[in-house]
């Protein structure tokens, strides 16, 4: 798998736009496909990406496909179209945060079609995607890893193979358990600080000197102090989806499952109160 072969990229959104930009900067020929939001598509076309109008046309022009999609359901539906029509020896690199069952099923379908399937869920956020400083958690056949690493290297600072298919999903969901859990604790700490009359700015300065310091605190607190709440660019809708995936993975894990259930209930309540499409950090509004 040559890094400079034509790459098809499906999911050029919050994370995907920065990844495509860095693939283009590295000299790759990248095909993209629009979904609902044309703004990132138009910006990427202006920078040299090629737009294709359908998944079959993407499959006909690319032997390497990168997915960066919102959910396992969408990843499955896209792959169900692509896998039967991709040329043998093509590869799908799936950067979606997926359920374990999804990646295992897609791997079997791809294998039967003589196509390689690698899972590559990401660590980092929108800024890291722009800065090419993402982490990629790889689950794939051992023989596919070097090719996957070469393809993703323009986008990712750290690329690690955790093992065979399934290990990427497991590792990513546990990583999100840590990341979303930490962000939730930051928000709750900020809420109770305000409710107990503690000055946010002084609280942040002092908390950031202790063991409660985290990237989540640095993303959320300064923006909240300024009166804005877009420091953590991850929607409550996506948080619920990931928490459901995490709970499915950890449902027999005792305390971890109990904690996940509490977090999931918090975000379901927020969604019920009209915040489904708001950023996670927007829960600090009107405190």
Image: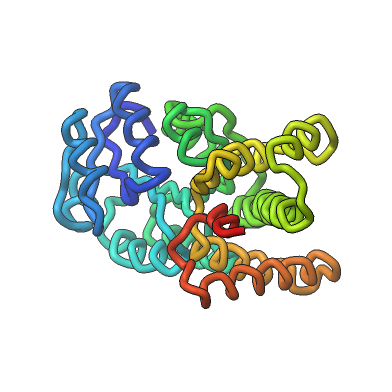
Viewer-closest of 178 and 57: 178
Extreme top residue here? 26
Task: Answer with left or right where residue 177 lies relative to residue 58.
Answer: right
Q: Position of residue 27 (x, y in %)?
A: 29, 22
Task: Answer with left or right where residue 182 lies relative to residue 69.
Answer: right
Viewer-closest of 166 and 68: 68
Viewer-closest of 210 and 257: 210
Residue 50 seen anywhere in this rendered image of the structure: yes
Q: Is residue 208 above or below residue 272?
A: above
Task: Answer with left or right where residue 199 lies relative to residue 111.
Answer: right
- Viewport quadrant of the N terminus: top left
Q: Position of residue 11 (x, y in %)?
A: 34, 51
Residue 171 seen anywhere in this rendered image of the structure: no
- Residue placed at 18% from the left, 36% from the top? 45
Task: Answer with left or right where residue 118 lies relative to residue 258.
Answer: left
Q: Is residue 4 above or below residue 94?
A: above
Extreme bottom residue here? 272
- Residue placed at 23% from the left, 41% from the top? 31
- Residue placed at 69% from the left, 66% from the top? 263
Q: Position of residue 17 (x, y in %)?
A: 34, 40
């Amino acid at each position: 798998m040559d890094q400079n072969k034509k790459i098809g990229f499906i999911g050029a959104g919050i994370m995907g736009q920065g990844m495509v930009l860095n693939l283009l900067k590295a000299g790759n020929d990248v095909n993209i496909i629009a979904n609902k939001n044309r703004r990132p598509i138009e910006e990427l076309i202006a920078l040299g990406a090629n737009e294709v109008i359908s998944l079959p046309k993407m499959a006909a022009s690319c032997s390497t496909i990168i997915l960066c999609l919102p959910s396992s359901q969408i990843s499955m539906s896209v792959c169900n179209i692509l896998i039967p029509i991709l040329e043998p020896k093509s590869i799908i690199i799936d950067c979606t945060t997926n359920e374990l069952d999804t990646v295992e099923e897609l791997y079997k379908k791809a294998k039967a079609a003589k196509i390689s399937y690698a899972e590559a869920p990401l660590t980092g956020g929108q800024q890291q995607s722009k800065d090419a400083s993402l982490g990629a958690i790889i689950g794939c056949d051992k023989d596919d890893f070097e090719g996957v690493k070469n393809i993703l290297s323009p986008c990712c600072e750290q690329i690690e193979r955790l093992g065979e298919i399934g290990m990427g999903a497991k590792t990513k969901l546990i990583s999100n358990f840590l990341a979303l859990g930490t962000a939730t604790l930051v928000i709750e700490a900020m809420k109770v600080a305000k409710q107990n009359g503690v000055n946010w700015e002084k609280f942040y300065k002092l908390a950031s000197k202790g063991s409660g310091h985290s990237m989540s605190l640095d993303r959320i607190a300064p923006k909240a102090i300024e009166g804005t709440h877009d420091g953590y660019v991850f929607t409550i809708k996506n948080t619920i989806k990931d928490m459901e995936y995490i709970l499915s993975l950890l449902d027999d894990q005792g305390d971890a499952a109990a904690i996940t259930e509490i977090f999931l209930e918090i975000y379901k309540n927020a969604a019920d109160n009209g915040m489904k499409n708001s950023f996670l950090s927007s829960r600090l509004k009107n405190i």
